Amino acid sequence: MADETQGNRTTHRDDRELLRLILQGQTDLYADLIVRYQSHVARVVRRRVPPDDVEEVVHDVFVRAYMGLSQYSGSVSFDHWLSGIAVRACYDFWRAQKREAVPVSSLTDDHQRWIDGVMSVESEAAFHDLVRRREATEVLQWALNRLSPENRAVLTLVHLEGRSAREAASLLGWSLVNVKVRAHRARRALRSLLTTHSRGHL
Amino acid sequence: MSAGREDSFCKLERALAEAHRLTDERTTQLDVVDRTMRIIRRTAVETDGRATANMLDELVWRTATIAAAVVLVATMLVVGVLHRSPLERAGLLAEEFDSAPLFGE
């Protein structure tokens, strides 16, 4: 499973120098950090919020990171630290959306057919062909939009991205027990959703 | 849940995970440097302003504390010099009596 934090396991030595200088008041150097890490942050955010909101959330992540820069201890790599902020910013985004109660569309016949197709597919090639279809993303978004922000955050980290519960806990800033319980509930909620709304195989 | 249903669900879950992974490939680059730096610079200026104000506050309080301490010490010294203890005053009075005999010699 692709992992956004695998790229730079340790903080670059010049990152440390940059961070030191920024904290000493050379604010303009923060632009170098944004240039260096915006693709990484965008990759985390793109998987979690609608395309139209990606830029806003990435911007928010870098502002939050700047505000908390003095709290960065260097015990984890800088990109991992940024990933945590990005994951929490996305979680906050969905919490705000939940408050506004955005209506979610329902599954169409095309989506139903896609689900049935995935269920009955035999070959790997056909499976990968189905996965690349527009309906795949739409069904995924449909399911995620019906989950609570908490379940959505944990399901994305643990089940969709294949991260360990410990890593998910570290990124979300939650306890390990909480993440494990949530991961179980989230998977059950997804299963229940798909069972309720699919006609054939489930 | 039967093995068949479990298999179906796992397949669907894997398909959704793949779809999630492929999200990256369908999007374009973005650039938030200018926008973010505008906010950061404004915040930095505000923080500097607040820091200067805090420094001034601290300077005023420190000066006032030192001035108050100096005034207190000076006052205590003055009081100490002007108002001697009753015992000391009695001693001085006795000295005066001693130096002025009642019946001239």
Image: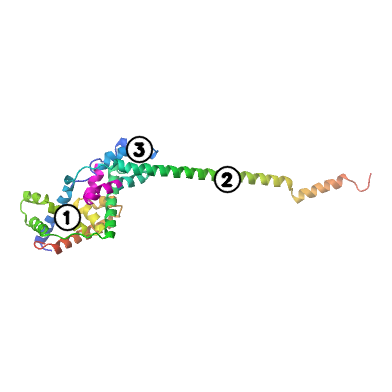
Residue at the spot of label 1: A140
- Chain for disc number 1: A
Contact, mark 3 vs mark 2 (Cβ under 8 Å):
no
Label 2 lies in what chain? B
Q: Nearer the viewer, residue B48 or A14?
A: B48
Q: How is the image coloured?
A: rainbow
Amino acid type of the residue that numbered disc 3 sits on in the rendered structure: Asp
Pick the quarter of the image with the C terminus of chain A: bottom left
Residue name at image x 16 percent, y 46 percent: B26
Q: Which residue is mark 2?
A: B64
Q: Position of residue B98 (x, y in %)?
A: 86, 46
The answer to whether residue A112 is magenta is no
- Classify residue B42 as left or right of residue A161: right
Give the residue drawn at x 80%, y 46%: B92
- The residue under label 3 is A28
The magenta stretch spans which residues?
A39-59
Q: Is residue A72 visible?
A: no
